[in-house]
Image: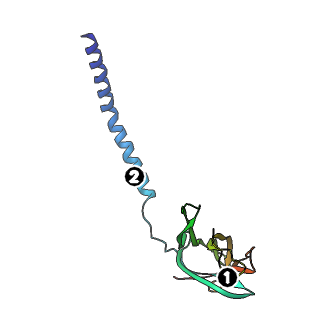
């Protein structure tokens, strides 16, 4: 019976202690809430600048454009924006008709920054495609395709409204050249 009295006394002390401390904790919480509400008070919203970005990825041969693809986005300054255009292609991986899927196409990640002297762009562009080796007769050889990939990371400043080539690269396995051109202009 003595153990019961002991635990009852301890419990009662805890309850009394909490009852005495609870009002102080509640006042402290209210004070903190008021401080947080002051710092979170909504002010007038600042309209972020929005930019229209036009990308043209071109393939050139003998300095003539033989293929090009255009991509466009609206981008708020400071936000990362992405374009994904492509397909998942089945690629034969063995003689037993086993396939692996490969993502091919164009991926563009871009962040616009307002900078002195123009529009700041941080661009990562990744273009991939499949090609098949040719035979002596000029036809595609059976077998496994070659995955071609061209990747460019650019941090630059461009003039508003002026088309600018921001990246150019040669294909190491042919006489082709690839280039990425961007035109950035303020939308609002």
Query: Residue beneath label 2, please?
Result: 34
Residue displayed at 74% across by 74% down: 173
Crowding near the residue tagged with mark 2, few <14, some 14–19, many ≥20 C-alpha atoms within 10 Å: few
Q: Relative to 101, is 138 above or below?
A: below
Residue displayed at 63% across by 85% down: 67
Q: Is residue 31 left or right of residue 164?
A: left
Residue farthest along the top direction in this orientation: 2
Residue farthest along the bottom direction in this orientation: 64
User: For residue 59, which numbered disc appears in the image?
Assistant: 1
Quadrant of the frame with the N terminus: top left
Where is residue 83 drawn, in percent x and y? Answer: 54, 73
**Circle 1: element type:** strand
Colour scheme of this structure image? rainbow
Mark in front: 2 vs 1: 1
Nearer-N-terminus badge (2/1): 2
**Circle 2: element type:** helix
Where is residue 109 drawn, in percent x and y? Answer: 58, 70
Task: Specify the quadrant of the image occupied by residue 42.
Answer: bottom left
Where is residue 148 drawn, in percent x and y? Answer: 66, 71
Q: Is residue 21 left or right of residue 162?
A: left
Q: Relative to 55, is 3 above or below?
A: above
Compute the Cα span from label 2 to label 1. Answer: 61 Å
Of residues 96 and 109, the one nearer the viewer is: 96
Q: Relative to 70, is 42 above or below?
A: above
Task: Specify the quadrant of the image occupied by residue 133.
Answer: bottom right
Task: Specify the quadrant of the image occupied by residue 151.
Answer: bottom right
């Amino acid at each position: 019976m003595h153990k019961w009295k002991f635990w009852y006394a301890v419990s009662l002390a805890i309850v009394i202690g909490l009852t005495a401390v609870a009002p102080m904790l509640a006042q402290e919480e209210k004070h903190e809430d008021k401080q947080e509400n002051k710092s979170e008070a909504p002010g007038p919203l600042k309209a972020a600048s929005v930019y229209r970005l036009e990308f043209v990825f071109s393939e050139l041969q003998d300095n003539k454009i033989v293929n090009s693809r255009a991509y466009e986005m609206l981008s708020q300054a400071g936000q990362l924006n992405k374009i994904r255009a492509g397909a998942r292609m089945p690629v034969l991986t063995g003689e037993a008709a086993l396939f692996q899927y490969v993502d091919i196409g164009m991926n563009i990640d871009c962040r616009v920054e307002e900078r002195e002297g123009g529009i700041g762009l941080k661009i990562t562009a990744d273009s991939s495609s499949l090609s098949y080796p040719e035979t002596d007769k000029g036809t595609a050889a059976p077998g496994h395709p070659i995955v071609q990939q061209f990747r460019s990371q650019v941090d630059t400043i461009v003039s508003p409204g002026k088309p600018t080539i921001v990246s150019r690269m040669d294909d190491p396995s042919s006489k082709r050249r690839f280039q990425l051109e961007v035109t950035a202009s303020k939308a609002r």
